[in-house]
């Protein structure tokens, strides 16, 4: 806990095109991280939320103060039951192939469930 948005802003400033967040539980972050993620998405960066838990899927269940519903409202994509490593590989391939956000969202839905 206690994470802030510095690492998100640093990633934006250095050209990151698709950060994958290893969020808490089903996909929750701190309010400070949510604020920075919202800025990244507004700047056109694709943000994907995966879970740091060894099992279980991400779903935007909770709202308020950085919950998954807040991330969904901001425009983040959810990895379903894909691990963060699998999401990074898929996202790198999709972005490298020129996929738009909508195609990335559809692919993650298909492979992550």
Image (tube, grey):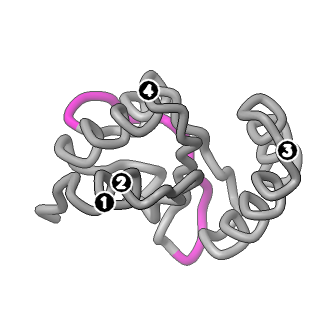
Q: Is residue 38 shown left or right of residue 5?
A: right
Residue farthest toward the top in the current orientation of the protein: 73
Residue occupying the point 18% across, 61% down: 3
Q: Tag 3's secondary structure?
A: helix
Residue occupying the point 60% across, 69% down: 84
In this rendering, the label closer to the viewer, 2 or 3: 2
Label 3: which residue? 107
Give the mark, 4 or 1, whose residue is nearer the N terminus: 1
Give the mark, 4 or 3, whose residue is nearer the N terminus: 4
The alpha-carbon separation of the residues under discs 2 and 3 comes to 27 Å
Q: Are marks 3 and 1 in contact (CB under 8 Å)?
A: no
43 or 105, nearer to the observer: 43
The alpha-carbon separation of the residues under discs 4 and 2 comes to 14 Å
Within-10-Å neighbours for mark 3: few <14, some 14–19, many 20+: some
Label 2: which residue? 13
Q: Position of residue 92 (x, y in %)?
A: 73, 63
Give the mark, 2 or 3, whose residue is nearer the N terminus: 2
Within-10-Å neighbours for mark 4: few <14, some 14–19, many 20+: few
14 or 72, nearer to the observer: 14
Label 1: which residue? 10
Please determine whether, in this image, residue 36 is positioned above or below residue 8: above
Point out the stretch of residues depicted in magenta.
54-65
Residue occupying the point 34% across, 33% down: 39
Q: Position of residue 40 (x, y in %)?
A: 41, 39
Residue occupying the point 53% across, 45% down: 47
Give the mark, 4 or 2, whose residue is nearer the N terminus: 2
Q: Are marks 1 and 2 in contact (CB under 8 Å)?
A: yes
Label 4: which residue? 42
Q: Tag 2's secondary structure?
A: helix
The alpha-carbon separation of the residues under discs 4 and 1 comes to 15 Å
Q: Is residue 47 shown left or right of residue 29?
A: right
Quarter holding the N terminus is bottom left
């Amino acid at each position: 806990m206690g994470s802030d948005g510095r690492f998100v802003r640093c990633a934006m400033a250095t050209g990151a095109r698709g950060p994958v967040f290893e969020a808490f539980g089903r996909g929750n972050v701190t309010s400070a991280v949510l604020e920075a993620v919202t800025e990244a998405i507004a700047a056109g960066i694709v943000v994907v939320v995966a879970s740091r838990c060894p099992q279980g899927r991400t779903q935007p269940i909770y709202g308020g103060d950085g919950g998954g519903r807040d991330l969904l409202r901001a425009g983040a994509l959810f990895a379903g039951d894909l691990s963060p490593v699998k999401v990074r590989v898929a996202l790198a391939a999709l972005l490298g192939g020129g996929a738009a956000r909508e195609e990335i969202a559809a692919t993650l839905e298909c492979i992550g469930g």
